[in-house]
Amino acid sequence: MDSYLIQVSGHGDHAPMLDVHLKTNGNSVSSGKVKGRKPRWAVRASEMSKKTFNPVRAIVDSMKVEPNPRKAMISLSLGDPTVFGNLPTNDEVTQAVKEVLDLGHYNGYAPSVGYQSCREAVAAYYRCPEAPLEAQDVILTSGCSQAIELALAVLANPGQNILVPRPGFSLYKTLALSMGIEVKLYNLLPEKAWEIDLKHLESLVDEKTACLIVNNPSNPCGSVFSKSHLQKILAVASRQCVPILADEIYGDMVFADCKYEPIATLSTNVPILSCGGLAKRWLVPGWRMGWILIHDRRDIFGNEIRDGLLRLSQRILGPCTIVQGALERILHQTPPEFYHNTLSILKSNADLCYAALSAIPGLRPVRPAGAMYLMVEIEMEHFPEFENDVEFTERLISEQSVFCLPATCFEYPNFFRVVITVPEEMMLEACSRIQEFCEMHYQGAEGAQDLECDK
């Protein structure tokens, strides 16, 4: 019957690429052929995917250990305040979303950077005389994680480096390495309540340094920087002309005896991208609502960084529109007692955990001042049967069914992180089991030395 020829011809430097014959009698179809290439399957993962590495998942997934079947599992490992149901969000927050859903006005696509009115709501919530904000200074994102990703992507090119805290949130390194950006780790000092080693920080800066990440309040440390320490950090950034990416997702989640200072309120000359969101303070991490606040009073970022953030945000069509529609009410009508009650529970658990673990030989917890975490040093010389913090925490699971993250996940070996969002009775039980575990394996100086000699 009829025969058709489909031919794509090249011109100049381009050779013909495709030659397809179709017979319409239904008996045969001859496939096209690409000249100069023998067809074969060659599907490979991208270089970006190969460079993407989450150390928490890599370490946790490799911990092939079963909990003690005689003891119920207590997980103190996941930074999700909703897991145990003891920290529900406020009714005002939930009602705001219900009403938006019922109205049906936010079911379509929004601008990639978020609705103008919603950006204005965020700007109004965070603006102050020391750090003015307008709607155009706000980019809405799919959670704080995407805010950090966009901020990194706009500030750094492959081959450049960023300065990241150690111990620090593992996502910074995961994102950077996937983008071909080098990570330089600056030290935090446990003996100084996890303040930054400023000399070490400044020594890492070179001509390829694209930005400095400051996480305050801190995950995993639960630390909160003082105003004077933040000013010293800003002085380093100013001297070295390095912009700051401020991860402030735990902003205002500080205990009563401490004060949170947004870093942008303390400087007029250092450009800052501050990343935050609803996840932690409003206890809704699954709603995926975050933001970037652009602080640039000297116009150092100029239009270039703003335009870059706009273009990057256009790779997806912005965060959930339903939550956007509820933002103004969530931010401005959530009652203060909700925040107070949340912090009261966290502070009580922090105090309880700190006191209990401080009394255990071989452990040295560092008192937190905010966020949802506490870091504990393991005096490994007193636990010589364990090679490192990973082995220590593995055995804690298998013997006591208590799961804490080894701080190797945060580039800081021989510590472990405790999440303090669990119910009080669970916190007490976990501390009791950790004590039993340590008493079982603790070796005094003489005993530890004998065991080393036997190896």
Image (cartoon, grey):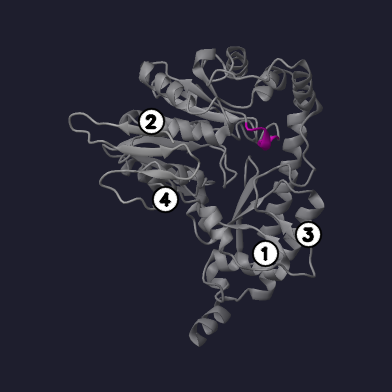
Closest to the camera, between mark 1 and mark 2, is 2
Whether label 3 touches label 2, CB < 8 Å: no
**Nearest-to-viewer mark from 3 and 4:** 4
The label shown at residue 312 is none
Q: Is tag 1's residue or tag 2's residue first in the polypeptide sequence?
A: 2
Percent from the top left, x then y, of residue 75? Answer: 70, 56
The residue where tag 4 is placed is 43
According to the picture, the residue beneath numbered tag 3 turns out to be 429
The amino acid type, in three-letter code, at marker 2 is: Leu
Horizontal relation, residue 231 to residue 124: left or right: left
From mark 4 to mark 1, how far is it between C-alphas? 54 Å
Determine the main secondary structure of the stretch shown in magenta: helix
Kind of residue indicated by mark 3: Glu
Residue identifier under label 1: 360
Contact check, label 1 and label 3, Cβ < 8 Å = no
Quarter of the rendering containing residue 141: top right
Q: Are marks 1 and 2 in contact (CB under 8 Å)?
A: no
Can residue 330 be seen in this snapshot? yes
Q: Nearer the viewer, mark 1 or mark 3?
A: 3
Left or right: residue 85 versus residue 167 is: right
In contact (CB < 8 Å): disc 4 and disc 1: no
Q: Which residues are magenta?
A: 284-288
Please report whichever mark, 1 or 3, sits nearer to the chain's N-terminal start. 1
Circle 2 SS class:
helix
The percent coordinates of residue 237 (x first, y second) are 37, 31
Q: Which residue is mark 2?
A: 155
Within 10 Å of the Cα at label 2, are there few (<14), some (14-19), or many (20+) other Cα atoms?
many
